[in-house]
Image (tube, rainbow, N blue to C red):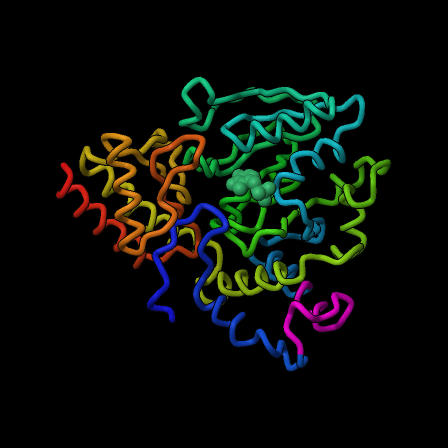
Amino acid sequence: MTDQRIHNFNAGPAALPLTVLEEIQSSFLNFAQSGMSITEISHRSSYFDNVINGAVARAKRLLKLDERFHVLFLQGGASLQFAMIPMNFLSEDDTADYVNTGTWSTKAIKEAQILKKNHRVVASSEDKDFSYIPTNISFSKDAKYVHLTSNNTIKGTQYNKFPDTNGVPIVCDMSSDIFSRPLDMEKFGMIYAGAQKNLGPSGTCMVILRQDMLDTANENLPSMLKYSTFASKNSMYNTPPCFGIYTIDLVLKWIEEEMGGLEKMEEYNIQKADLLYDFIDSGSFYRTTAEKFSRSLMNVTFRLPSEELEKQFVAEATKKGFGGLKGHRSVGGCRASIYNAATMESIHALIQFMESFEKENK
Ligand SMILES: *Cc1c(COP(=O)(O)O)cnc(C)c1O
């Protein structure tokens, strides 16, 4: 079976570690000697308590979170967070700073607009087609939060260092790079991520939220749109996405126990990305679209000499067992998404394919 699996460079839903998939498969019919699969177990049972508490504890250990932080699981994807953030954190007199680094930041800003909340776009890289991460930004001193997108999945850029925001908490969309590297959590009031890039299946959104953000949050909201509802009920006010949380627990276990934690995870991700970027930089047939100092370790976006060649490249790659290399439909080109679970073996195989494609089509 496993020799039929492709080299999966999908942007999301994306590749998961093989050992995680194998564990799901082998325990699927009889989870933890319960006589049931994980999809058939009550979320009010001790079986599921162990799963969700395990996932929360692993997230806390990996990111070295202190007791101020809540680890929550919500539904509605990262996209619902774009609205929940201004709803929960901005009262009438509050304002927030947003940095616009691409499609997802733009969507986050749009929700603040729809909700008519005070906000300021303090920097944007739209002037150069979102090919870089803005620096030397002057943030407001009185903002409630600064919203950033740490990794721009579509344009292939990433903050390699988070900016100094004068102590204003950063609220960060980390959908495509959460748990790919260690973080200095002092800077963050909240981080969130749709699971389907680096964590598990779609349908779950992980939210890591600091207590002081909750303390001043709006309470006059529908229950399902308030963070306090989830924080006070260990994410189980209603039925949570059980299978997603279970898979996330296994992925976090894989990072902890097989990869050796976030420092090691980052080293591995740097090695993989360097290999691919170095190969692309070594010739002129392929070229990356992001500026060098802003390039993402997770999404390598690149172009070929013509759109025709790009089409042919993706088609031949697919035939040879490489998936997901087509760029996002809004930008074209090619993209190799190399999240945590992408293996060095897959990167080597891709480079080999790219070399031979170049030789045949130069
Ligand atoms: C994929 C993605 C989203 C959207 O996530 P959904 O879970 O589909 O809502 C948001 N932000 C970033 C950075 C993404 O990569």
Q: Nearer the viewer, residue 43 or 171?
A: 43
The image position of residue 84, as x and y in percent, is 71, 37
Query: Which region is colored magenta?
Result: 36-52
Q: Residue furthest right?
A: 220
* Residue 330 painted magenta: no
Residue shown at 33% from the left, 50% from the top: 272
Q: For ligand 1, which image quadrant applies?
A: top right
Where does the N terminus fall, quadrant-wise?
bottom left
Q: For this view, does 91 lie left or right of residue 145?
A: right
Residue 136 position (above or below residue 8):
above
Residue shown at 71% from the left, 53% from the top: 67
Residue 255 position (above or below residue 274):
below
Q: For this view, does 226 lie left or right of residue 339?
A: right
Label tally: 0
Residue 186 position (above or below residue 135):
below
Q: Residue furthest top?
A: 127
State which quadrant residue 40 falls in. bottom right
Residue shown at 48% from the left, 59% from the top: 261
Residue shown at 40% from the left, 32% from the top: 294
Residue 110 position (above or below residue 52):
above
The image position of residue 19, as x and y in percent, is 45, 68
Q: For this view, does 108 lie left or right of residue 161?
A: right
Where does the C terminus fall, quadrant-wise?
top left
Q: For this view, does 129 lie left or right of residue 36?
A: left
* Residue 44 painted magenta: yes
Q: Nearer the viewer, residue 188 or 109?
A: 109
The image position of residue 156, as x and y in percent, is 41, 36
The image position of residue 221, as x and y in percent, is 83, 37
